Amino acid sequence: MREIVVPTLFRLATSLCFLFFISGCTTPVPLLEYSLARSAIDSAKNVEAVKYSPSHWHQASEYYRTATLLYKDGRYEEAKENFLQAKAFAEKAENLTRLKRFKSGDVVQ
């Protein structure tokens, strides 16, 4: 009986160590970055950044598009970086748009 229990316990312990090792090496899903980038894109779109800051808007939308594709492929670390870039460019587009509209007398709601 002891001959059966020891190898079984050893296999169980080895399997558990392997699972802990694998779970510790995975990249967390960048849900926060995804949400913040989506919110920044929406805000830039609402102030018409496409019209007033097309270069920043284009970069933001390209980074966001790439990030969503990477996210769907499970390449979370790369997706996270692209979401952060999308957020940064969307915020720049929104801020520049608000500034240009303020200077021209066009009030942004």
Image: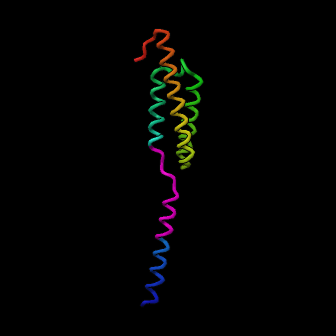
- Looking at the rendered image, the quarter that the C terminus falls into is top left
Q: Residue at x 46, y 70 (%)?
A: 16
Q: Residue at x 53, y 43 (%)?
A: 80
- Looking at the rendered image, the quarter that the N terminus falls into is bottom left
* Residue bounds of the magenta highlight: 16-31
Pinpoint residue 66: horizontal percent, then vertical percent: 58, 38
Q: Is residue 87 magenta?
A: no
Q: Residue 98, relative to residue 5: is it above or below?
A: above
Q: Residue 23, relative to residue 84: is it above or below?
A: below
Q: Residue 16, relative to residue 75: is it above or below?
A: below
Colour convention of the picture:
rainbow
- Please, which residue is most extreme toward the top here? 105
- Total labels drawn: 0
Pinpoint residue 100: horizontal percent, then vertical percent: 51, 15
Instruction: Determine whether, in the image, residue 70 is placed left or right of residue 35.
Output: right
Pinpoint residue 79: horizontal percent, then vertical percent: 54, 43
Pinpoint residue 25: horizontal percent, then vertical percent: 52, 58
Q: 24 or 51, which is in the foreground?
A: 24
Instruction: Determine whether, in the image, residue 56 is placed left or right of residue 6.
Output: right
Q: Residue at x 59, y 30 (%)?
A: 59
Q: Residue at x 49, y 20 (%)?
A: 48
Q: 10 or 46, which is in the foreground?
A: 10
Main SS category, magenta section: helix
